[in-house]
Amino acid sequence: MSRVQKEPLRRLRPEERSHLERVSRAFGLPAALVARAKVLLAVADGRTYIEAAHLAGRRTGDAVAALVSLFNHQGLAALEPRHAGGPAILYDTPAKERILREFHRKPDRERDGTATWSFDDAPARIASRTRWPALRQHVYDLVRFARVGSELAARSELVSDRRGCATPEARWSRG
């Protein structure tokens, strides 16, 4: 038996209803967002919280009650996911921007010292730090195969489609 709804869903404005209907039919949006939109539309159409939960693939109506309460206070912003627990987020906006700038920056030998590696000198650096000849040889082999693979992939007659078959242009160009 369902409980009495302490806070029923407020009346939806036409623009809110159209937005919820668009989101509920979207394939490219996160599943949680689509499920929340379906729940709100079901409750707006007169279904109980438990029925709305089952329509969206949920088990109980408790989360529906919380979502309805949030929607009544915040509107469409209630659809967006929020921090789901765990440690508090420590980075503020300037720190995030600084981290992203550093991530996208090109390496500079003067600024970064010898910490910058290229694909060419990586095997020598790794091999110089190991005493195991088998590992050293393995690193050299990996780099050599990677170079050969990239050269082969650049050749037009070996281009293939997603299924691994040669494309028609590649088949006809072979003669």
Image (spheres, helix red, strand yellow):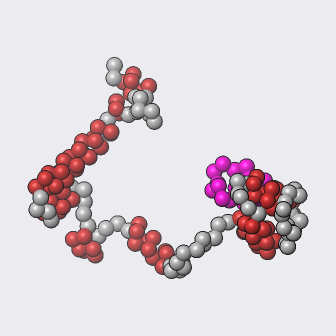
Q: Is 92 located above or below residue 118 in the figure?
A: below
**Residue at the spot 41% in from the left edge and 32% down from the top edge:** 164
Location of residue 5 (image quadrant): bottom right
**Residue at the spot 32% in from the left edge and 35% down from the top edge:** 155
Residue 96 is left or right of residue 106, and the answer is right
What segment carries the magenta color?
20-39
Work out whether residue 100 or residue 90 is closer to the camera in this orientation and state it.
90
Q: Is 40 located above or below residue 93 in the figure?
A: above
Residue 16 can be seen in this image: no
Residue 127 is left or right of residue 168, and the answer is left
Q: In which quadrant is the N terminus drawn?
A: bottom right
Q: Is 131 located above or below residue 7 in the figure?
A: above
Residue at the farthest front position: 1
Instruction: Examine the residues drawn in magenta and state their main secondary structure.
Output: helix
**Residue at the spot 81% in from the left edge and 61% down from the top edge:** 49
Q: Is 148 located above or below residue 88 in the figure?
A: above
Residue at the farthest top position: 175
Location of residue 75 (image quadrant): bottom right
**Residue at the spot 21% in from the left edge and 71% down from the top edge:** 114
Work out whether residue 42 or residue 18 is closer to the camera in this orientation and state it.
42
